[in-house]
Amino acid sequence: MRILGIESSCDETAAAVVEDGARVLSSVIASQFSTHGKYGGVVPELASREHMRAIVPVVNEALERAQMKLEDLNAIAVTHGPGLVGSLLVGITYAKALCYARNIPLIGINHIEGHIHSVILEAGDAIDFPALALVVSGGHTHMYHATEDCTYRLLAKTRDDAAGEAFDKVAKLLGFGYPGGPVVDMLAAHGNPHAIKFTFAKMKGKTHDFSFSGLKTAVLRWAEAQNMQAEIDRRRALVEPKLDDWLAATPQATLDLLASFQYTIIEELFRRVRAFAEETDARSLIVSGGVACNSGLRKAAQSGQLPLPVFFPTPGLSTDNAAMIAAAAFPKLRRGEHSGFDLRAYANLALA
Ligand code: KG4
Ligand code: ZN
Protein backbone atom coordinates (compact mmCIF):
# COMPACT_ATOMS: atom_id res chain seq x y z
CA MET A 1 0.00 0.00 0.00
CA ARG A 2 1.42 3.37 -1.03
CA ILE A 3 0.65 6.45 0.99
CA LEU A 4 1.52 10.04 0.15
CA GLY A 5 2.28 11.95 3.35
CA ILE A 6 1.97 15.74 3.59
CA GLU A 7 3.41 17.77 6.49
CA SER A 8 3.08 21.55 6.95
CA SER A 9 2.59 22.07 10.69
CA CYS A 10 5.45 24.50 11.29
CA ASP A 11 8.30 25.73 9.10
CA GLU A 12 8.87 22.78 6.77
CA THR A 13 6.74 21.93 3.75
CA ALA A 14 7.22 18.22 3.23
CA ALA A 15 5.83 15.39 1.11
CA ALA A 16 6.83 11.72 0.92
CA VAL A 17 5.67 8.44 -0.55
CA VAL A 18 6.00 5.43 1.78
CA GLU A 19 5.17 1.85 0.89
CA ASP A 20 3.63 -0.46 3.52
CA GLY A 21 4.69 1.87 6.34
CA ALA A 22 8.28 0.74 5.95
CA ARG A 23 9.87 1.71 2.63
CA VAL A 24 10.49 5.39 1.91
CA LEU A 25 10.16 5.78 -1.88
CA SER A 26 10.71 9.54 -1.70
CA SER A 27 10.93 12.28 0.91
CA VAL A 28 11.09 15.95 -0.02
CA ILE A 29 11.48 18.75 2.54
CA ALA A 30 11.42 22.47 1.75
CA SER A 31 12.75 24.26 4.80
CA GLN A 32 11.96 27.87 5.67
CA PHE A 33 15.08 28.51 7.81
CA SER A 34 16.22 31.39 5.62
CA THR A 35 12.79 33.09 5.90
CA HIS A 36 12.56 32.93 9.69
CA GLY A 37 16.27 32.98 10.63
CA LYS A 38 16.52 36.77 10.76
CA TYR A 39 13.59 36.96 13.19
CA GLY A 40 15.07 34.34 15.56
CA GLY A 41 11.92 32.20 15.42
CA VAL A 42 9.01 31.15 13.22
CA VAL A 43 6.72 33.99 12.06
CA PRO A 44 3.28 32.32 11.52
CA GLU A 45 2.05 34.55 8.65
CA LEU A 46 5.30 34.12 6.72
CA ALA A 47 5.17 30.35 7.35
CA SER A 48 1.67 30.03 5.80
CA ARG A 49 2.73 32.05 2.77
CA GLU A 50 5.83 29.92 2.24
CA HIS A 51 3.76 26.72 2.54
CA MET A 52 1.37 28.00 -0.13
CA ARG A 53 4.30 28.64 -2.46
CA ALA A 54 5.94 25.29 -1.80
CA ILE A 55 3.12 22.76 -1.42
CA VAL A 56 2.42 21.99 -5.10
CA PRO A 57 6.07 21.69 -6.25
CA VAL A 58 7.02 19.69 -3.13
CA VAL A 59 4.20 17.16 -3.63
CA ASN A 60 4.98 16.90 -7.36
CA GLU A 61 8.64 16.30 -6.61
CA ALA A 62 7.81 13.59 -4.06
CA LEU A 63 5.66 11.81 -6.65
CA GLU A 64 8.28 12.21 -9.36
CA ARG A 65 11.11 10.89 -7.18
CA ALA A 66 8.95 7.89 -6.23
CA GLN A 67 8.17 7.46 -9.96
CA MET A 68 4.49 7.54 -9.15
CA LYS A 69 1.36 9.19 -10.34
CA LEU A 70 -1.58 10.16 -8.14
CA GLU A 71 -3.48 7.12 -9.42
CA ASP A 72 -0.79 4.83 -7.98
CA LEU A 73 -1.58 5.96 -4.42
CA ASN A 74 -3.84 4.11 -1.97
CA ALA A 75 -4.33 7.06 0.38
CA ILE A 76 -3.10 10.51 1.37
CA ALA A 77 -2.09 11.27 4.95
CA VAL A 78 -1.81 14.81 6.25
CA THR A 79 -0.80 16.39 9.57
CA HIS A 80 -3.83 18.05 11.15
CA GLY A 81 -2.25 19.18 14.42
CA PRO A 82 -0.67 20.20 16.67
CA GLY A 83 0.94 23.17 14.93
CA LEU A 84 0.28 26.57 13.42
CA VAL A 85 -3.31 26.55 12.17
CA GLY A 86 -2.61 28.67 9.07
CA SER A 87 0.26 26.38 8.12
CA LEU A 88 -1.67 23.16 8.83
CA LEU A 89 -4.56 24.36 6.66
CA VAL A 90 -2.34 24.62 3.59
CA GLY A 91 -1.44 20.91 3.79
CA ILE A 92 -4.95 19.82 4.79
CA THR A 93 -6.66 21.74 2.00
CA TYR A 94 -4.32 20.41 -0.66
CA ALA A 95 -4.59 16.84 0.65
CA LYS A 96 -8.40 17.08 0.61
CA ALA A 97 -8.39 18.38 -2.98
CA LEU A 98 -6.16 15.53 -4.17
CA CYS A 99 -8.21 12.88 -2.34
CA TYR A 100 -11.43 14.31 -3.73
CA ALA A 101 -10.03 14.38 -7.28
CA ARG A 102 -8.75 10.79 -7.11
CA ASN A 103 -11.47 9.39 -4.84
CA ILE A 104 -8.96 7.90 -2.39
CA PRO A 105 -9.00 7.95 1.44
CA LEU A 106 -7.80 10.95 3.43
CA ILE A 107 -6.12 10.17 6.77
CA GLY A 108 -5.50 12.92 9.33
CA ILE A 109 -2.38 12.33 11.45
CA ASN A 110 -1.25 13.82 14.72
CA HIS A 111 2.23 15.30 14.20
CA ILE A 112 3.47 13.74 17.46
CA GLU A 113 2.32 10.28 16.38
CA GLY A 114 4.22 10.96 13.16
CA HIS A 115 7.44 11.56 15.12
CA ILE A 116 6.96 8.26 16.98
CA HIS A 117 6.48 6.47 13.64
CA SER A 118 9.70 7.95 12.25
CA VAL A 119 11.39 5.39 14.53
CA ILE A 120 8.96 2.51 13.90
CA LEU A 121 9.33 3.11 10.15
CA GLU A 122 13.02 2.25 10.32
CA ALA A 123 13.38 -0.07 13.30
CA GLY A 124 10.17 -2.07 12.73
CA ASP A 125 10.13 -5.41 14.54
CA ALA A 126 13.35 -4.71 16.42
CA ILE A 127 11.38 -2.55 18.87
CA ASP A 128 10.07 -4.53 21.80
CA PHE A 129 6.69 -3.09 22.86
CA PRO A 130 5.33 -1.61 25.04
CA ALA A 131 7.80 1.24 24.66
CA LEU A 132 8.46 4.61 26.20
CA ALA A 133 8.20 7.20 23.43
CA LEU A 134 10.05 10.44 24.12
CA VAL A 135 9.19 13.15 21.60
CA VAL A 136 11.59 16.06 21.94
CA SER A 137 11.27 18.87 19.42
CA GLY A 138 10.87 22.62 19.12
CA GLY A 139 7.23 22.38 20.11
CA HIS A 140 6.99 19.28 22.30
CA THR A 141 8.64 17.43 25.13
CA HIS A 142 6.29 14.55 25.77
CA MET A 143 6.80 11.07 27.15
CA TYR A 144 4.24 8.41 26.21
CA HIS A 145 3.66 4.78 26.95
CA ALA A 146 3.15 3.29 23.47
CA THR A 147 1.81 -0.14 22.56
CA GLU A 148 2.34 -2.10 19.36
CA ASP A 149 -1.22 -1.43 18.21
CA CYS A 150 -0.65 2.35 18.40
CA THR A 151 -2.38 3.23 21.65
CA TYR A 152 -0.72 5.95 23.66
CA ARG A 153 -0.82 7.09 27.28
CA LEU A 154 0.74 10.43 28.20
CA LEU A 155 3.17 9.98 31.09
CA ALA A 156 4.81 13.42 31.26
CA LYS A 157 5.03 16.65 29.33
CA THR A 158 6.76 19.98 29.63
CA ARG A 159 5.15 22.55 31.90
CA ASP A 160 6.75 25.44 29.98
CA ASP A 161 9.37 25.41 27.21
CA ALA A 162 9.98 22.37 25.03
CA ALA A 163 13.54 20.99 25.01
CA GLY A 164 14.16 22.25 21.45
CA GLU A 165 12.71 25.62 22.39
CA ALA A 166 15.22 25.80 25.27
CA PHE A 167 18.06 25.11 22.78
CA ASP A 168 16.69 27.79 20.44
CA LYS A 169 16.15 30.40 23.17
CA VAL A 170 19.55 29.87 24.80
CA ALA A 171 21.21 30.04 21.38
CA LYS A 172 19.38 33.28 20.63
CA LEU A 173 20.23 34.94 23.93
CA LEU A 174 23.92 34.03 23.50
CA GLY A 175 24.00 35.49 19.97
CA PHE A 176 23.79 32.32 17.87
CA GLY A 177 21.42 31.85 14.93
CA TYR A 178 18.09 30.07 14.53
CA PRO A 179 17.44 27.19 14.93
CA GLY A 180 19.87 26.96 17.82
CA GLY A 181 19.93 23.20 18.43
CA PRO A 182 22.43 22.20 15.72
CA VAL A 183 24.86 25.05 16.60
CA VAL A 184 24.74 24.36 20.34
CA ASP A 185 25.19 20.64 19.63
CA MET A 186 28.33 21.26 17.57
CA LEU A 187 29.84 23.76 20.04
CA ALA A 188 28.94 21.78 23.17
CA ALA A 189 31.12 18.93 21.88
CA HIS A 190 34.13 21.25 22.48
CA GLY A 191 33.18 22.16 26.05
CA ASN A 192 33.25 20.59 29.53
CA PRO A 193 29.73 19.40 30.44
CA HIS A 194 30.57 19.46 34.15
CA ALA A 195 32.01 23.00 34.23
CA ILE A 196 28.79 24.56 35.58
CA LYS A 197 26.39 22.71 37.85
CA PHE A 198 22.91 23.86 36.87
CA THR A 199 20.13 22.75 39.20
CA PHE A 200 17.62 20.21 37.94
CA ALA A 201 13.95 21.17 37.76
CA LYS A 202 11.93 20.18 40.81
CA MET A 203 8.20 19.61 40.41
CA LYS A 204 5.78 19.68 43.28
CA GLY A 205 3.94 16.42 43.95
CA LYS A 206 4.50 13.06 42.29
CA THR A 207 4.64 14.29 38.72
CA HIS A 208 7.57 13.58 36.43
CA ASP A 209 6.67 16.51 34.16
CA PHE A 210 9.49 18.42 32.48
CA SER A 211 10.41 22.08 32.87
CA PHE A 212 13.14 23.91 30.96
CA SER A 213 12.41 27.61 31.41
CA GLY A 214 14.32 27.77 34.72
CA LEU A 215 17.43 26.41 33.01
CA LYS A 216 17.13 29.01 30.25
CA THR A 217 16.89 31.78 32.90
CA ALA A 218 19.91 30.30 34.73
CA VAL A 219 21.92 30.55 31.48
CA LEU A 220 20.76 34.16 31.05
CA ARG A 221 21.80 35.05 34.63
CA TRP A 222 25.16 33.35 34.06
CA ALA A 223 25.75 35.36 30.89
CA GLU A 224 24.88 38.59 32.73
CA ALA A 225 27.15 37.75 35.67
CA GLN A 226 30.05 36.98 33.30
CA ASN A 227 29.59 40.24 31.34
CA MET A 228 29.26 38.38 28.05
CA GLN A 229 27.47 41.18 26.17
CA ALA A 230 30.43 42.27 23.99
CA GLU A 231 31.09 38.66 22.97
CA ILE A 232 27.37 38.15 22.21
CA ASP A 233 27.26 41.33 20.09
CA ARG A 234 30.29 40.17 18.11
CA ARG A 235 28.50 36.93 17.27
CA ARG A 236 25.29 38.75 16.33
CA ALA A 237 27.28 40.86 13.86
CA LEU A 238 28.56 37.81 11.94
CA VAL A 239 27.25 37.64 8.39
CA GLU A 240 25.95 34.22 7.29
CA PRO A 241 28.26 32.36 9.70
CA LYS A 242 29.17 28.74 9.16
CA LEU A 243 29.82 26.32 12.03
CA ASP A 244 33.59 27.12 11.96
CA ASP A 245 32.81 30.84 12.29
CA TRP A 246 30.67 30.18 15.37
CA LEU A 247 33.48 28.12 16.87
CA ALA A 248 36.05 30.87 16.20
CA ALA A 249 33.73 33.44 17.84
CA THR A 250 33.14 31.40 20.99
CA PRO A 251 35.65 31.38 23.88
CA GLN A 252 36.26 28.23 25.93
CA ALA A 253 34.19 29.51 28.88
CA THR A 254 31.13 29.79 26.60
CA LEU A 255 31.78 26.36 25.09
CA ASP A 256 31.77 25.04 28.68
CA LEU A 257 28.51 26.92 29.35
CA LEU A 258 26.87 25.33 26.29
CA ALA A 259 28.17 21.86 27.16
CA SER A 260 26.85 22.21 30.74
CA PHE A 261 23.48 23.44 29.47
CA GLN A 262 23.18 20.54 27.03
CA TYR A 263 24.27 18.05 29.68
CA THR A 264 21.54 19.33 32.02
CA ILE A 265 18.86 18.93 29.32
CA ILE A 266 20.00 15.38 28.57
CA GLU A 267 20.07 14.50 32.27
CA GLU A 268 16.54 15.96 32.74
CA LEU A 269 15.30 13.69 29.95
CA PHE A 270 17.16 10.63 31.23
CA ARG A 271 15.92 11.06 34.79
CA ARG A 272 12.34 10.65 33.53
CA VAL A 273 13.29 7.69 31.35
CA ARG A 274 14.82 5.93 34.37
CA ALA A 275 11.74 6.68 36.51
CA PHE A 276 9.23 5.44 33.90
CA ALA A 277 11.35 2.39 33.09
CA GLU A 278 10.85 1.43 36.73
CA GLU A 279 7.22 2.47 37.06
CA THR A 280 5.86 0.96 33.83
CA ASP A 281 6.17 -2.30 31.87
CA ALA A 282 8.09 -0.58 29.03
CA ARG A 283 10.69 -2.74 27.31
CA SER A 284 12.33 -0.18 25.06
CA LEU A 285 12.74 3.55 24.48
CA ILE A 286 11.94 5.42 21.28
CA VAL A 287 13.42 8.93 20.99
CA SER A 288 12.24 11.20 18.18
CA GLY A 289 11.75 14.85 17.19
CA GLY A 290 14.37 17.42 16.19
CA VAL A 291 16.29 17.21 19.48
CA ALA A 292 16.79 13.48 18.78
CA CYS A 293 19.44 14.70 16.28
CA ASN A 294 21.55 15.91 19.20
CA SER A 295 24.85 14.05 19.10
CA GLY A 296 25.44 14.41 22.87
CA LEU A 297 22.02 12.89 23.55
CA ARG A 298 22.61 9.99 21.13
CA LYS A 299 26.06 9.30 22.53
CA ALA A 300 24.83 9.36 26.14
CA ALA A 301 21.80 7.17 25.30
CA GLN A 302 23.99 4.60 23.63
CA SER A 303 26.62 4.50 26.37
CA GLY A 304 24.66 2.09 28.55
CA GLN A 305 23.38 4.73 31.02
CA LEU A 306 19.76 3.81 30.37
CA PRO A 307 17.97 0.68 31.55
CA LEU A 308 16.21 0.08 28.19
CA PRO A 309 17.35 -0.49 24.59
CA VAL A 310 17.10 2.86 22.77
CA PHE A 311 15.90 3.52 19.20
CA PHE A 312 16.51 6.76 17.31
CA PRO A 313 15.48 7.68 13.77
CA THR A 314 18.26 8.55 11.33
CA PRO A 315 18.85 12.33 11.63
CA GLY A 316 16.99 13.06 8.37
CA LEU A 317 13.84 11.55 9.86
CA SER A 318 14.27 13.14 13.31
CA THR A 319 13.29 16.65 12.26
CA ASP A 320 9.96 17.38 10.59
CA ASN A 321 9.33 15.30 7.48
CA ALA A 322 6.39 13.71 5.69
CA ALA A 323 7.65 10.10 5.58
CA MET A 324 6.76 9.81 9.28
CA ILE A 325 3.23 11.07 8.52
CA ALA A 326 2.74 8.50 5.75
CA ALA A 327 4.18 5.77 8.00
CA ALA A 328 1.82 6.65 10.86
CA ALA A 329 -1.13 6.37 8.47
CA PHE A 330 -0.32 2.83 7.35
CA PRO A 331 -1.79 0.97 10.38
CA LYS A 332 -4.87 3.21 10.20
CA LEU A 333 -5.37 2.50 6.49
CA ARG A 334 -5.10 -1.24 7.20
CA ARG A 335 -7.75 -0.89 9.89
CA GLY A 336 -9.97 1.10 7.51
CA GLU A 337 -9.72 4.30 9.59
CA HIS A 338 -10.23 7.27 7.29
CA SER A 339 -10.97 10.96 7.91
CA GLY A 340 -13.88 12.86 6.43
CA PHE A 341 -13.60 15.94 4.26
CA ASP A 342 -14.54 17.91 7.37
CA LEU A 343 -11.02 17.21 8.77
CA ARG A 344 -9.94 20.34 10.65
CA ALA A 345 -6.66 21.84 11.85
CA TYR A 346 -6.08 21.87 15.60
CA ALA A 347 -3.29 23.98 17.09
CA ASN A 348 -3.22 21.89 20.28
CA LEU A 349 -4.29 18.48 19.05
CA ALA A 350 -3.51 15.99 21.82
CA LEU A 351 -2.27 12.45 21.14
CA ALA A 352 -3.43 11.13 24.49
O1 KG4 B 1 10.86 18.15 15.14
P1 KG4 B 1 11.30 19.49 14.66
O2 KG4 B 1 11.93 19.59 13.30
O3 KG4 B 1 10.12 20.52 14.68
C1 KG4 B 1 9.13 20.57 15.67
O4 KG4 B 1 8.18 19.74 15.61
O5 KG4 B 1 9.33 21.41 16.58
O6 KG4 B 1 12.32 20.05 15.78
C2 KG4 B 1 12.97 21.28 15.64
C3 KG4 B 1 13.75 21.53 16.93
C4 KG4 B 1 14.38 22.91 17.02
O7 KG4 B 1 14.09 23.45 18.28
C5 KG4 B 1 15.86 22.63 16.84
O8 KG4 B 1 16.69 23.57 17.50
C6 KG4 B 1 15.99 21.27 17.47
O9 KG4 B 1 14.82 20.58 17.06
N1 KG4 B 1 17.18 20.57 17.00
C7 KG4 B 1 18.20 20.21 17.81
C8 KG4 B 1 19.19 19.63 16.98
N2 KG4 B 1 18.72 19.64 15.69
C9 KG4 B 1 17.49 20.22 15.73
N3 KG4 B 1 18.34 20.34 19.13
C10 KG4 B 1 19.49 19.88 19.68
N4 KG4 B 1 20.49 19.34 18.95
C11 KG4 B 1 20.39 19.18 17.61
N5 KG4 B 1 21.37 18.63 16.89
ZN1 ZN C 1 8.03 18.02 14.77
Image: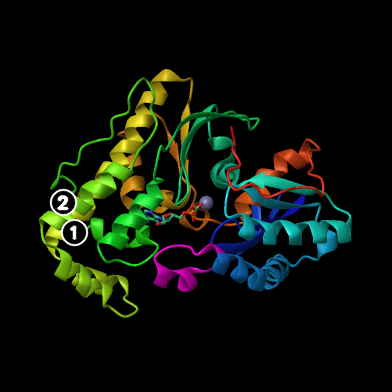
Q: Residue at x 81, y 66 (%)?
A: 69
Give the residue at x 85% y 52%: 104
What residue sits right under mark 2 in the picture?
A: 192
Left or right for 54, reference 229: right
* Residue 224 pos. (x, y %): 15, 57
Q: Which amino acid type is marked by label 1?
A: Leu
Residue 267, picture quadrant: top left
Range covered by the magenta-colored residues: 31-44
Near mark 2 (Cα within 10 A), the count class, few <14, some 14-19 or many ≥20, is some
Instruction: Please name the residue that numbered disc 1 is placed on.
Output: 255
Under mark 2, the amino acid is Asn
| Disc 1 element | helix
For residue 323: magenta? Answer: no
- The reply to whether dot 1 and dot 2 touch (C-beta < 8 Å) is yes
Classify mark 2: helix, strand or loop: loop
Out of 212 and 260, give the one closest to the viewer.
Answer: 212
Q: Is 219 on the left-hand or right-hand side of 70? A: left
